[in-house]
Structures are given as structure tokens and as C-alpha cells.
Amino acid sequence: MFVRTAGERDLVAVRALLVETRHATCDAVYGAANVTGITDDWHSIVSLRSWLTRPNSEFLVADDGTRIGGMAFAAAAADGKVIMLNQLYVHPDCQRRGIGQALLDEIEASFPEARTLRVEVEEANRGAIAFYRASGFLPSGSVAGARDVARPATLSLEKPLG
């Protein structure tokens, strides 16, 4: 798979990837109906489309020419020194093949002035936490959540850059 900038024609495939990956990761924790509600809200085509034109951001897909196997979206803070990795998903069938790392590497390269890359990961998502820790992220605190489906508790992780 190669990493490239996402476009309008990718949105349906990206949404499908997000829905399937979210269900595979979270159904056992939150229940399928709750995960559907989350993905309908967070991963709607309207929401994804807004990422295409957001200033100081990067929306990437991992593409093999026949399918989208992963995606990432990150945006810079006002000063450009801190980058928030809002989304990084790899389809379950494509995990452990270096796609997540390739997306992460391209996000880092997209913001050469940045000094910190930050991500918030649901505490229940142990696989994602292990991935980020192996990629050089360190815990920087917990983010208060209601510990329910709408606002699950998350762990904040940061990686120094540059």
C-alpha cells in the first residue's frame, strides 16, 4: 500500500473502513448498537468531507489501487508546534503489515515545524496504546471522560519530534 492525500472520491471507502474497524475494535466493549451510533456521528461523510479543507491539517489514506487499507487525519495547533493526531485507523485485515507506521511517518513528515505529536486513545483500546508506545509515544495523562459510550475515558500520549 502507498500513502497519499485523501480526496473526495475516497470518502465512501474511508467511512466504510472506519465503521468496520471501529466495530471490530469496540463492539465487545460498548456493544454494536452503541458503536453504530458513534460511527454515524463521528464518521459521517459530512464530517469526513470537512477534513478535506481544514487548514493546517493532513488527511491521508493507505491505498493499494483496489482498496483503502488505512487512514489518518491530523491537524496543527495555532502555533504549529503541536500536532493532534485525531484519527489513525487500519482495517483489521491489513493490521500488522506496517501500514499504521507508514501513515504515522507521513503525518510526522507533513508537519516539519512541529515539536510534539499528540494522540488520545480510549483506555480500552490496548492494541492502539501498544502501537503508539512502540512508535515512541509516552503517556502524558488521562483525559477525563464520563466513562460511557459517548465520552469514553482516554489516555493522552505524546511523541517528541525534531
Image (cartoon, rainbow, N blue to C red):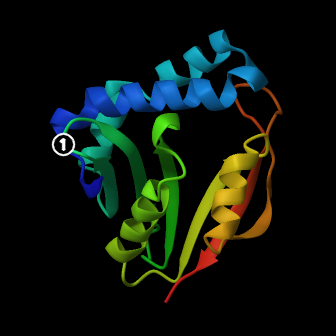
State whether residue 85 is above or below residue 127.
Answer: below
State the residue position of label 1.
65
Viewer-side residue, 158 vs 29: 29
x then y, percent, for residue 82: 52, 73
In the displayed structure image, the side of residue 97 where residue 138 appears, left or right? right
Residue 122 visible, this angle: no
In the image, what residue occupies the spot 76% across and 47% down? 126
In the image, what residue occupies the spot 34% across and 34% down? 14
In the image, what residue occupies the spot 48% across and 25% down? 19
State whether residue 155 is above or below residue 118.
Answer: above
x then y, percent, for residue 44: 39, 25
Residue 159 visible, this angle: yes
Locate residue 80: give its quadrant: bottom left
Amino acid type of the residue that numbered disc 1 sits on in the rendered structure? Gly
SS at badge 1: loop
For the image, the number of numbered tags is 1
